[in-house]
Image (tube, grey):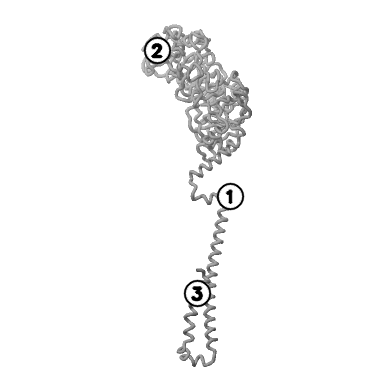
Amino acid sequence: MGSSQRNNQFNDEDRAEKEPLISDESFREKYRDILGDDDSEPEITHKWKSRKKKSFVEEVNIKQLILLIIVLIAVILAAVFGIRSCVRAVGNGKTDIEGSIASASEATVSEAERAELERERLTESVISEYDDLAVVTASGYINMRSAPNTVDMTNIIGKLPQNAACDIVETDGEWSLVESGGIRGYVYNTYLATGDEAKEMAGELIKERAVVTVPKLNIRTEPVIDPENVLGSALEGERYEVISTDGNWAKIVADKIEGVEEAFISVSDGNAELRVCMDEAKRLDLREMVLTQYDNLVVSATDGYINIRETPEDKGIDNICGKFPEAAGAELLETVENDGRTWYKIKSGPVTGYIAAEYTVTGQGARDTAVDNAILTAVITTDSLNVRTEPSLEAEVWTQVTKNQEYHVLDQLDGWVEIELDSSDGDEEADKAYISTRDNNVDVRYGLAEAVEYYPAVEAANAAAAFRNEIVNYACQFVGNPYVWGGTSLTNGADCSGFVMSVLKHFGISVPRVSRDQARAGVRVTSDQMKPGDLVFYANSSGTVNHVGMYIGNGQVVNAASRRSGIRIYRWNYRTPVAIRNVIGP
């Protein structure tokens, strides 16, 4: 029932009750003296009724006015809150429509659903950056080449890691010309996912990454500028997944660096751009790769090895901590003058120490030497890796190589690398050795040789131990001298068995000429019984002994390895040993 109806009803009832009282005769008689005998009563009665009606109407109008004011206030408040919601939506970078949708659905859309919507938006945004998206499906990486052929290893200009993205420019038969990471080159179609498959894969591969924007950026062990905490270099265009950021530093995934999972790069001063994107190609250019690995390059400029010392002074063998090979590279940390001689404090590979400056070259001379002597190297990044006779997982496994060891690359195939193990004793050509690059087990890069950690044997518990130490220290004097197949000269060149035979002969110990016969001399020992001076033997793919080295302690052997490597120091299990023999005695 409406308010006007209720008011009318109330007025009618009011009149029904009041009018009989006014017309009652007893009432009139009682108040005749006041009312008189004339006809004024009706007028007085009507005036009373008129006053009664007016006060009620005024009361009703006040109630309506209050109600109207309340309604107006509610409308104004609703408008104000609506405007503030729109302002907040615009402030969050949304359109008016998006703001309205977000406000309306806030109570029904879960955090997970909102995250999924944002993920879809980002995915579409990243995919739109590619005209014809393709994603690498090969395990490890595939090569990008300047020409569509696999015969010439020098045409490799970059590598596309597994799950990296590229843009297909054109396709011709088995090859596609692609662009990625600022590089344009040819790749095999076999290893590319395209179309809807590539777009579906992209959804899981888009992450926050630091994209390097300078020619070279140091990768460090901690977020501090220090020449001694440099792990390696990131080149312009390379992308690294970001774990977290803190001010001017980004913590990145660095699992492709030997023994490292996390590292830091500076993102200040425009060094790198933080972006949500996919991984892309990495450049593989000899000059750029070599020169950008060092801030202050120093290169060995003498034949053979230079001793690296713990202190800037020549103390015989007492302070030697490493060997710096011919044409090896290092970071020059400091220049020190001592006793009229200049020493460089360097960091090369696992070794930090001092070398005599007169045996090195710096500046432009170092850069020229580096480019002339850079080699393509395969660095093992897993604990152990099978070596096969053919580039196939079906091929026979005949030995294993171990983590952090470096091998010269003889050839590269997609998914495989042919490496140089050793020159075979008895056969001028060694077996072909292939390792798989799948699962990032191998890092292939151009670079210089690096220092080898080496501590001469100086302590001896008894005369027998002292004798063994004398033998291995003598053998290590010839590190860096050439390998010559069939040779026995410690200075002019020897092969592996000729080297150990000549070293032992110097101390009056006789062994057979070739390694397979030497492997039957003396007494067999196990690796936990091995002592400096014992001989360690390795076999070819058929299981026949074809290589030998001498154990020198500290988990290392010295051996005449190959024409490229010469006489070198290496880890004793750089490939799987098949026998260890004691030919010296107790």
Residue 159 appears in which quarter of the rendering? top right
Q: Which of 315 and 470 is in front in this view?
A: 470
- Residue 312 is left or right of residue 362, and the answer is left
Instruction: Give the total number of marks visible in the rendering.
Output: 3
Residue to which mark 3 is pinned: 9
Is 26 or 308 nearer to us in this picture? Answer: 26
Looking at the rendered structure, the secondary structure element under dot 3 is helix
Q: Earlier in the sequence, mark 2 or mark 3?
A: 3
Judged left or right of residue 231, residue 173 is right
Label 3 crowd (10 A; few <14 / some 14-19 / many >=20): few
N-terminal label among 1 and 2: 1
Q: Marks 2 and 1: in contact by CB < 8 Å?
A: no
**Residue position marked by numbered label 2 in the rendering:** 581
Numbered circle sitting on residue 570: none
Q: Is mark 1 on a helix, strand or loop?
A: helix
Q: Nearer the viewer, mark 2 or mark 3?
A: 3
Residue in front for this viewpoint, 21 or 400: 21
What residue is rendered at 54% in x and 75% in y? 58
**Most foreground residue, 25 or 141:** 25
Which disc, if any, is residue 97? 1
Q: Is residue 379 above or below residue 203?
A: above
Residue 330, horizontal then vertical, whole percent: 54, 25
Is label 1 or label 2 in front? 1
Q: Which amino acid does label 2 sit on?
A: Arg
